[in-house]
């Protein structure tokens, strides 16, 4: 019969509409309550400070009292600073990464280190590299015409051999 919709069809149209309302509603509620932020570690940092305020953002390698090695990195168009890293095997490493410009990615190929670097936030990733080796460190978020050049290397040396 023309002009009528089968009950099953009515049900599925209604269920689809409800799902859409739930999805859109969850986005609106999250935005309204200010809950839209990166998962896990949440630390705000003014993107302008990343480039120009060494008291708030100083790229480099610092050993922490608990034995962790903290690596502070700047991800900017289109390189990482410091550009080359040398770290010891077997030690806990804490990467802290921030961007002064656009969104970047931070991936150490062949490991499970893979994170987004969103301007305005500090990204934190913990890792341990059990064995010495050389790893490729790449940006895996498209960040402009130089994106494909945004890569550098990470060398893991035997424990006790690093600076
Ligand atoms: Cu930075 Cu792609």
Image (tube, helix red, strand yellow):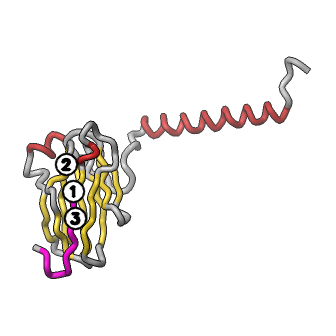
Classify mark 2: helix, strand or loop: strand
Left or right: 21, with 5 as reference point: left
> What residue appears at the point 14 percent right and 43 percent down from the top-left corner?
49
Classify mark 1: helix, strand or loop: strand
Whether the residues at callouts 2 and 3 have beta carbons within 8 Å, the answer is: no
Determine which residue is flagged by label 3: 154
Q: Quadrant of the C terminus?
A: bottom left
Residue 136 vs residue 24, the one in the foreground: 136
Is the residue marked 3 within 8 Å of ligand 1, measured from its CB? no
> What residue appears at the point 73 percent right and 32 percent down from the top-left corner?
13
Q: Earlier in the sequence, mark 2 or mark 1?
A: 2
Percent of width and height locating residue 123:
28, 54
Vertical position of residue 35 compared to residue 125: above or below: above
What is the crowding at mark 1: few (fewer than 14 residues within 10 Å), some, or many (at least 20)? some
Whether the residues at callouts 2 and 1 have beta carbons within 8 Å, the answer is: yes
Cα separation, mark 2 vs mark 1, equals: 8 Å
| Res. 63 image quadrant | bottom left
Q: Earlier in the sequence, mark 2 or mark 3?
A: 2
Percent of width and height locating residue 129:
29, 73
Residue at the extreme right = 1
Determine which residue is flagged by label 2: 79
Which disc number belongs to residue 152?
A: 1
Whether the residues at callouts 1 and 3 have beta carbons within 8 Å, the answer is: yes
Left or right: 110, with 18 as reference point: left
Residue 54 falls inside the magenta stretch:
no
Residue 161 falls inside the magenta stretch:
yes
Q: Quadrant of the N terminus?
A: top right
Span highlighted in magenta in the image: 153-162
Which disc number belongs to residue 161?
A: none
Percent of width and height locating residue 157:
19, 76
């Amino acid at each position: 019969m023309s002009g009528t919709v089968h009950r099953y069809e009515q049900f599925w149209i209604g269920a689809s509409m409800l799902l859409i309302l739930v999805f859109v509603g969850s986005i609106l509620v999250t935005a309204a309550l200010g809950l839209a932020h990166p998962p896990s570690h949440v630390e705000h940092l003014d993107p302008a400070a990343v480039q120009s305020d060494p008291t708030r953002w100083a790229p480099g390698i610092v050993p922490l009292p608990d034995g962790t090695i903290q690596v502070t990195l700047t991800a900017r168009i289109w390189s990482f600073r410091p550009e080359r890293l040398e770290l010891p095997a077997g030690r806990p490493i804490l990467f802290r990464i921030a961007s002064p410009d656009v969104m970047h990615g931070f991936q150490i190929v062949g490991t499970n280190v893979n994170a987004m670097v969103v301007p305005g936030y500090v990204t934190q990733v913990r890792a341990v590299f059990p064995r010495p080796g050389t790893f490729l460190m790449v940006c895996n978020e498209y960040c402009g015409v130089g994106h494909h050049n945004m890569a550098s290397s990470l060398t893991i040396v035997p424990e006790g051999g690093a600076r």
